[in-house]
């Protein structure tokens, strides 16, 4: 059983670990930002924040981790679609373009 799972956004320092995970899963590394599930300092699954399928360690029980990543991705996507967030993004774009 996997315990003490951390879900986080990927960083540029995760590229090689993501590539290894993709090779284990016979898949391609996600393009762009991804969500990572790790336990005991080991990356066990990754899911692109945009669209695309998850990659996961086939030697570990990761189905629940992938479901957790999918839930988190949906939460992030839902939060980005709220009217308040859209207005904030417009406001920030306007300020940045005038800087």
Image: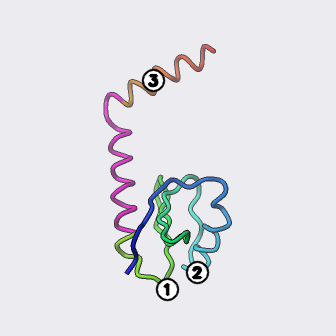
Above-or-below relation of 54 to 75: below
Q: Tell me the residue that label 3 is attached to.
A: 90
Image label count: 3
CA distance separating discs 3 and 2 = 41 Å
Q: Tell me the residue that label 2 is attached to.
A: 24
Element at label 2: helix
Above-or-below relation of 99 to 5: above
The x, y position of residue 87, in whole percent, is 38, 24
Of the image marks 1 and 3, the number of the one nearer the N terminus: 1
Q: Tell me the residue that label 1 is attached to.
A: 59
Of the image marks 1 and 2, the number of the one nearer the N terminus: 2
Q: Nearer the viewer, mark 1 or mark 3?
A: 1
Position of 47 with respect to 84 (left or right) is right
List the single residue furthest toward the top. Answer: 98
Element at label 3: helix
Foreground residue among 7 and 18: 7
Q: Which quadrant holds the N terminus?
A: bottom left
Residue at 49% over, 86% down: 59
Foreground residue among 91 and 72: 72
The x, y position of residue 46, in whole percent, is 50, 65
| Magenta stretch: helix, strand or loop mostly | helix
State yes or no: residue 59 in magenta.
Answer: no
- For residue 97, which numbered disc appears in the image? none
Q: Which quadrant holds the C terminus?
A: top right
CA distance separating discs 1 and 3 = 45 Å
Of the image marks 3 and 2, the number of the one nearer the N terminus: 2
Please state the extent of the stretch shown in magenta in the rendering: 66-84
């Amino acid at each position: 059983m996997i315990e003490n799972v951390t879900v986080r956004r990927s960083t540029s320092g995760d590229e090689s670990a993501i590539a290894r995970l993709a090779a284990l899963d016979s898949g391609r590394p996600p393009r762009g930002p991804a969500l990572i599930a790790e336990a005991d300092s080991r990356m066990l699954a990754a899911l692109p924040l945009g669209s695309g399928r998850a990659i996961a360690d086939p030697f570990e029980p990761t189905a629940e981790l992938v479901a957790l990543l999918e839930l988190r991705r949906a939460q992030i996507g839902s939060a980005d679609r709220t009217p308040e967030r859209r207005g904030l993004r417009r406001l920030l774009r306007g300020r940045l373009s005038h800087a």
